[in-house]
Every structure is written in C-alpha cells, then in structure tokens.
Image (cartoon, coloured by chain):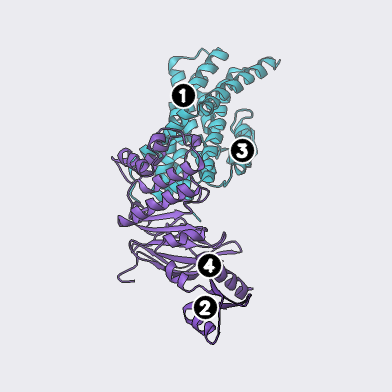
Chain colours: A cyan, B purple
Amino acid sequence: MMLLAPHRTKALAGRVLRQLRADPRFVAVSLIIPLVITFLLKVFFDAIDVPMFDQTRFAVPGAAFIVHFVTYILTALVLVRERVGGTMERMFINGYRQLEIIGGYLGAYTVLATWQSFLILTWVALLFDLGYSIGAYVQIYLVIWLLAVLSMALGILVSNFARTEGQVIPFIPLIVVPSIFLSGMIVAVEDLPTWGQVLARFTPLFYANDVLQGIISGGTVLDTLNPFIALPLLTVGILFIASRTLREGT
Amino acid sequence: MTGSPTISVRSVHKSFGTVEALAGVDLEVAEGEIFGLVGPNGAGKTTLIRALVGALRPEDGEITVLGLNPRRDRYEIRGRLGYMPQTPALYEDLSAFVNVRFFAAAHLRNRAAEKARAALDFIDLADRADDPVHTLSGGMKQRVSLACALAHEPDLLFLDEPTAGIDPQLREAFWTGFRRLAAGGRTMVVSTHQMSEALECDRVAIMRAGRVLVAEDPRALLGRGRATIRVWQEGRAEETVVDDYSVDLPRLLAGRDRVDRVEIDRETLEDIVLRMIDDDAARSA
C-alpha cells in the first residue's frame, strides 16, 4: 500500500477550488444549466395533454438525471484537459499520487455538487409546487447529492480512457442513454426484457430513481435501503477502478 | 568519472508504435555536472528525459538515478528531482505564485509558500508573482515553469529545452542561473537543439535517431574539429581540409618560397555536431 499524504490531497483540492473561483463561467454553467433544463422539462410536461399524467412522479428523478449528466460530463472534461495540458504528468512527476489526485478532485467538486443539488432541488420544488415534508426534502437532497458524487467518480473513470476532449464525446451516450431507458424513470424495469433488467443494475440512476420514487410516494430511505446503500458502494467501486486505471505515463 | 555516477543509462530502448525513439542509449552523468543533450528534433532528447524522470517505462535496458530506478522507485526519488517539461504545463487561470506553490506542496508540507516566493525571486519574476499565468509572455511562462522545478530545492534538475522560444538576453540570464545552481551542487540535465548552448555544459551527448553518437566535453569536441587551410600564393589560393591544422600547417607550408597569406577556418561546434549527425545519417541510409 503506497503511502498517501493528506497534505497533497488538500493542496490539490485547494488548487481546484481556486480554479473554480477564477472561472465564474464554469461555475455558472454547472449551476445554471441544470436549472434551465429543468425549466424546459416543466414546459414539456405542461404541454403533455394526457389525463392522469402526474408530473411530480418525474420531476425529482428528472432533476436527479440532469445533475447526474452535467456533473459526469464536466468532471470528465476537466480531467482530460489536465492530461492534454501536460499538468497531469507534471503532477505525477512532482510526486502527487493517483488516489491523492482523485481525492483532491472529488473533495473540491463535492463542494460544487453540494450547491448544485441544493439549487436544483429548491428549483424543482418551486417549479412543480411539490409540497413534500421537510424530512422528505432532506432525504431527496441526500440521494441527489450521493448521485452527484457518484457521477463525479464516473467522470473521473471515463477521463482515464480519453486522451483528448473529443474522445470524451462517445462516452456521453454510453452513460446518458442507459440512464434514460433502463433506470425505471420512463418504463418500469420489471417490464424490460431480461438483458435490460440486468443492464439496469449497472446504471447509477436505477438505484437513485428507486429510492426517490419510494420517498415521493410517502416512504423513507429505510424502505429502500439496499438501493440507497448501493449509491455510495458503487462510488467506492468506481473510484477504486479509476485509481487503478489512472495511468502515470506510457 | 570517479565514484558512482548520479545517472546511469544502459542500452535503453523505447518505441512508440513503429517509431524507435530510443535505440540503445548509453550514458552516465556525474554529480554536479551540467550535462547537455544536443540533437535535432526527433533525436530522442525529450523521450530520454521522460525516461529519466520515470514518466515512461523503457522496453529494454536499465536506468539508475541516484542509485534508484526512476520508475519502480518513483515515490522515493521524486522529492529529489525537479522537472521542467518542454511545454510550460501550468494552470493558466491561476497566478504564478499559486502554480509554483502547488507543485512545491507535493514535497513541502509547511514551507511551500515560502519556497515558492524564493523560487520566483530566483527567476526574477517576483513582481509578477500574483498575476494569472495567461497574462504572462511566453518567456515569463518558461521562467514560472522553471520555478516549479526549483522550488523544492531538488538535487537533480531535468530541463527539457528550457530556452526554446525565448530571446537571447533571457537565454543568457537562464544560463547564468543554471551555472549558479550547478555551483551550488546540483546536477543538471539540459536538452537543447541550439548547438551554441552545448559550450555551456560540462559534457554533452550528441543524439540522433534515438542514439548517442558521442558524449564528451564540448571543448574536447571542438579540438576534434576540422580546419580549412587556404594558402595564398601569387593571387591564387590552395585549399586543404585537415583534421589537425597544428600538425598539417607546417607540412603545407614546407618548401614554398613565398606565401602571401594563410587563412584558417576552423569548424565551429555547430559544424562539428552537424557533420557527425550527417555522417551518421549517411551510414544508416
């Protein structure tokens, strides 16, 4: 087990946070774009003239999907930019280690994810006039936050396989399409063919949607404990693979 | 060379696809030397430096730096070496000071800020330390990149084309700084494709096509240079190319009644290096 130094992880997280402060446009994109997309979702739902269509069933999972997608893509792109710019190699040669780099980025971007999850949940609650209890909102926030952290881990993993920002593009549909069709948001997973039900278990949004549907139906996370625990467990698993695939050189 | 070399490279090979970037490199660098890697673009200088800092793994051969394998023992060795890559590799949206402090923080738990300021003083950029890197000129970015390599006071410095793209005045300032660092006991490996900079080094390795053609004191290389001797008699010049004009000149002048003048054009170091590279290319063809 290689010796890790918390001060290096802290230095890296500090550097990333400074970069976020120095790039207000990036922060605005991360925070505002999800809100804009959610607004468009509301416009779309309002246009659906189908009796018995319950918008609220889709509002929170929809918001979770948007956070998942935006966080995943932005994290992947930022890390690939480090590799392209040569600063990734410079970090390694200066002594930063894989887990410290991953930990530093995760630590810094968790600050962004915390605000992102709060803003989008507040926005969705107001836009769709959800009226849930405080306890329900707290649990929903926790699920969205865990999903955001998992999405960052996924972004870090994907960035290990892309040498340029353009190479990140094919990974977008690889994550987005299964999230939409296999998570249970649109079609119940039990109604999918067997292979679809198996693949669904590899989709982070499958677990998040399961827990969220339980909460908005009046339950708690304790009623869907297994999928709730799956979120941090998947995060740890993905981060482990990311640390093993983050290559230093050639 | 007495004592163990600081750097030892034995029969190192490295390919990228079908391109053989290092084709059996052998060399040694002694402690406290300024060792130059000189050669045209594509000679393998950057690949060799990256292998020496452990950024890539050779397919064959052995590299020892400070008695350690730079790849296998990288966590032990990295605090003792400083690396300046060919491109600045800086965070353009952050200040020079924050960049230097960040890279220094990998080695220095508590004194990174202090050492960063000292490094920026050394490269004479203290007055721009708090400006974002994207506002600095190319030469200033090179200096910040050098400061990132120096801040933690490493024993060994690897500088990949540190003077590329900078003006002659700044280049002279860089070499003055390098000589100060070497005088302080640091060992330096510096790559350049400017032949004129080879004379700044204690020893140079001339590289071509992934191989070292010769590794010696550049002044000794100069002594191996050819000379063109032109002997003018009655308005006509007789031109001879000789290997050692001190030996051949008396022979050329012997038996002549009257000589109007004698001109001797000695090869510059650049001429010698280019001749060696061309001869090697012709042999390989």
- Mark 3 and mark 1 residues within 8 Å of each other at the beta carbon: no
The Cα atoms of the two marked residues, 4 and 1, are separated by 61 Å
Badge 3 sits on which subunit? A
The residue carrying mark 2 is: B243
Name the disc covering residue B240, or none: none
Q: Earlier in the sequence, mark 4 or mark 2?
A: 2
Discs 4 and 2 carry the same chain letter: yes
Helix, strand or loop at label 1? It is helix
Indicate which label's residue lies in the foreground, 3 or 2: 2
The local crowd at label 1, few if under 14, some if 14 to 19, many if 20 or more residues have their Cα within 10 Å, is some
Viewer-closest of A218 and A241 = A241
The residue carrying mark 4 is: B273
Percent across and percent down for residue A42 are 63, 17
Q: Split into 4 quadrants, where in the image is the C terminus of chain B?
A: bottom right
The local crowd at label 3, few if under 14, some if 14 to 19, many if 20 or more residues have their Cα within 10 Å, is some
Badge 2 sits on which subunit? B
Helix, strand or loop at label 4? It is helix
Name the disc covering residue A115, or none: 1
Above or below residue A106? Residue A131 is above
